Amino acid sequence: MIKVFSVLLFILIGFQTYTQSPEIYFMNANFNSPTSPYLETYLSFIGNSVVFVENENGNFQSEFEITVFFQKNDEIRMADKYFFKSPEISDTSKSKPNFIDQQRYSLSNGIYNVKLSINDINSGKPEITFMDFIEIGYNSEDLQFSDIQLIEQAVLSESESITTKNNYNMIPYISNFYPQNMNSLMFYVEIYNSDKSIEDDFILRYYIEKFETGLEIDNISRFRRFSPGSINPFIGELNIESLASGNYNLILEIRDRENKLLKSKEFFFQRSSITEKSEDDIKRLSDFEFKNVFPGTINSEDSLRKYISSLRPIANSHEVFFIDHQMNISSKESLQNYFYNFWLARNPANPNRSWMIYKEQVDFVNASYTTFISKGYQTDRGRVYLQYGTPGSVYISKHEPSAYPYEIWHYTEIANERNKRFVFYNPSFGQEDYTLLHSELTGEIKNPNWERMLHGRDNIIYDFDQTEADDHWGRRARDEFRK
């Protein structure tokens, strides 16, 4: 793998920071070029959350080991490992600057699983891992968009660097969350092959819609006229000062002279704001009203974070992003807003009732599956229980010869599928921390060698050609799974 460029920049926005573990944010965007498509990766490091040590210059600096894997069709098609250093500072007693790392990788068309691991070398903390699914499918004929890259600033540049595209030097904004102090949404996008798809000038219209309803927000839209070309780069900006807290989509539309829609693209983002237009929301989410809707200790920030974290097993991808990347740096009001809207979307008539039913399930999995290091809802068994409900039957084996302790859960009907099973096992013995080893359900882990791994105490060699375990006295896993 050839790494094309590497760059280090200061982030201009401020974050609330925590020192318990490194706060790092990851985003990516892909584009096309005359030579090949490429993917850009963006990492944001919160300075006060990482460890700075003295270097040979007498200044202080943090250092990271970063590994990136691109997997396609179950094969590693590209890998990169590099070391990355922060800017140097002279005094660690003051607030440390935030900084970013940007990389660019040439990739062919296809579907990739991306895994990025970051080790803060000086902290001694466990490495942080990000995983994402990307699809690259550019050609030289069809009207296409690149990905949408959120940016913080764009200035004309006479020199080339990794942050330069089409003569503009762009500082990426590495989040899809816009706090109250950010009143502008700025982005970069490229349009490809308009000269082969459109005969006359065309319009790019961009606006914001409410995520839950798909309704356009009034008075936040703009447009730009283009002449057809092989590539039409564009930097757009929308004023979101009046945009109330909530979930939104940025929408881009290509329309011809007759206003016919030719192509569209959307990008999900979240907003936290106090505006005159959101007075009803403020009243609804005030402490008094919030207590009425969700009574009890949920007004506490610690309780809110704990409860929101427990929602992860049933959250959609956009909601998971907030839990993983925004929850720990959000205000109490933002947490209340997120929690309220989460349950309002699921039960507009009585959101509290849905929460109380779910909370009983969370309490159950916490009591049943909590380990020394994880709450019950953070374990595989807890996640499956919360996501799919109570299994129809459970077979438990703790003392089967040659096998690790295991459980087989059977669901008669689940997610519009019938007779699906989950196999959990505990290769560590010391804790009740069972890992999901295999499932028949679409979208869950499928492991054709699950039997041999389950009987790994005797089947030491992992044989890809042999999936069934060797015969042993007392073995029952295969029969129980096939019932």
Image: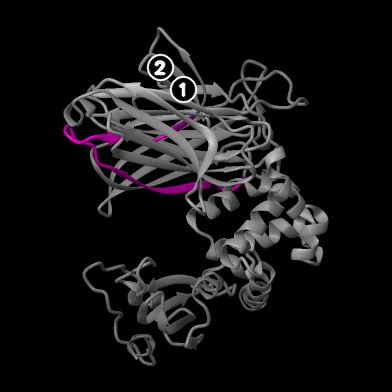
Q: What element carries label 1?
A: strand
Q: What residue type is disc 2 on?
A: Ser
Q: To which residue does mark 2 refer?
A: 161
Horizontal and vertical percent for residue 148?
A: 41, 34
- How many circles with numbers are drawn on the protein? 2
Task: Say if 164 sits above or below 276 in the image.
Answer: above
Task: Say if 78 sits above or below 452 in the image.
Answer: above
Quadrant of the rendering where the N terminus is positioned: top left
Question: Residue 191's mark?
Answer: none
Q: To which residue does mark 1 refer?
A: 7
Nearer to us: label 1 or label 2:
2
- Rounded to the nearest angstrom, the CA distance separating label 1 from label 2 is 8 Å
- Going by the image, does 246 lie left or right of 231? right
Horizontal and vertical percent for residue 97?
A: 66, 25
Task: Say if 272 sits above or below 219 in the image.
Answer: below
Residue at 36 percent across and 44 percent down: it is 69
Q: Quarter of the image holding residue 270?
A: top right
Callouts 1 and 2 close, C-beta under 8 Å? yes
Q: What residue type is disc 1 on?
A: Val
Residue at 43 percent across and 23 percent down: it is 235
Q: Which residue lies most toward the front here?
A: 258
- Going by the image, does 255 lie left or right of 9? left
Q: Which residue lies most toward the right here?
A: 288
Lower sequence index among marks 1 and 2: 1
Q: Quarter of the image holding residue 369?
A: bottom right
Q: Which of 28 and 249 is in front in this view?
A: 249
Number of other residues with Cα within 10 Å of mark 2, as a class: few under 14, some 14 to 19, many 20 or more: some
Horizontal and vertical percent for residue 448?
A: 29, 71
- Going by the image, does 414 lie left or right of 51? left
Extent of the magenta region: 125-150
Residue at 68 percent across and 36 percent down: it is 180
Q: Does the magenta stretch include residue 145?
A: yes
